[in-house]
Image: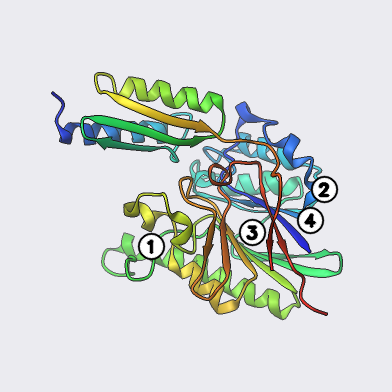
Amino acid sequence: MIRIAAVGDIHLGPGSAGTLRPAFDTLGDCADVLLLAGDLTRHGTREEARVVAAEVAGLPVPVVAVLGNHDYQSDQADLVTRELAEEGVHVLEGDGVTLDIRGVTVGIAGTKGFGGGFAGRSAAEFGEPEMKAFIRYTRACADGLGRTLSELRTRGSGLRVALTHFSPVPDTLAGEPLEIYPFLGSYLLAEAIDGAGADLAVHGHAHLGTEHGMTGGGVRVRNVAMPVIDRAFAVYHLAPPPG
Amino acid sequence: MTSVENLDYRVEHLRDRLAHEDIAELGVRVEARGAWVMVWGGVADARSRAAVLRIAAEELEGVPWHEDLTVQHAGPPGSAEVLS
């Protein structure tokens, strides 16, 4: 089994340093990789990113992350990414990483993603420039995710995971007010995942949502926002491909 | 008596403060229900919970409100989910 640990929305800052480290120190016993599904900070400052980086520094498993909307709040996403990367975190945005886990090539494709809503109730790329830019941005995130998943398959990944902050499906938003679903995710992410294929999709962002969902194409989706899973991380066991 | 319209605005003012103050808390749900306001959800730690309650008390002064704010657990999971 390949053991995927994941958590999102940890919202760390100087006042919460060390909160998760005791739990993260157990990862070597129960997981092969840790995925961070965005909203790692509160305001997206370099100082907060340093706290996150210290929280995962030197862990016995590789750490792969995407950023979330909070991590963009101070317009320093590049600095947040740099602080994390300096501690060895793979920060993805429209790209991916492959990990050799006991002989299995595990590919992680990541994007923050964005909103727009879900099929039959989604915003259209139409009208004002701001509205068009909104959906174009989501589409660009989804395109990057789909392209990366396809590349990971071509490069021989036996297992592929799609890592986002925003949700690809409405299933895992249950518990959130229906009216804000368009700000919580987009069907474009699910369409990209289903188009390229994946073994698991992991996201955060929806604090009041639920853990379990599935894309229309049958890919399991897990909302790992920390308020949802109510623990430091969740662990999913994926069977490696036969042969 | 506070009108329903005024309660709606008070709710949004509270949500706005929660987002923009140091706590940057967008995950707490705040809603008007009849003559009351409900504040609920999960927050990262006891300090965040205290901050949300303080800001709510300031912003909802004069309005009856209930809270059901929980603090999420930061321990490791007891088991894994097997997906096969």
**Residue position for label 4:** A32
How far is disc 4 from disc 3 in space, using C-alphas? 18 Å
Q: Pointer 1: what residue?
A: A117
Position of A7 with respect to A172 (left or right) is: right
Question: At 58% across and 46% down in the image, what residue appears?
Answer: A229
SS for dot 1: loop
Mark 2 highlights which residue?
A28
Give the amino acid type for the residue marked by disc 1 in the picture: Gly
- State the CA–CA distance, disc 3 to disc 1: 23 Å
Q: Are marks 4 and 3 on the same chain?
A: yes
Q: Amino acid at mark 2?
A: Gly
For marks 4 and 3, the one nearer the N-term is 4
Q: Position of residue B52 (x, y in %)?
A: 43, 27
Foreground: disc 3 or disc 2: 2
The residue to which callout 3 is attached is A92
Label 3 SS? loop
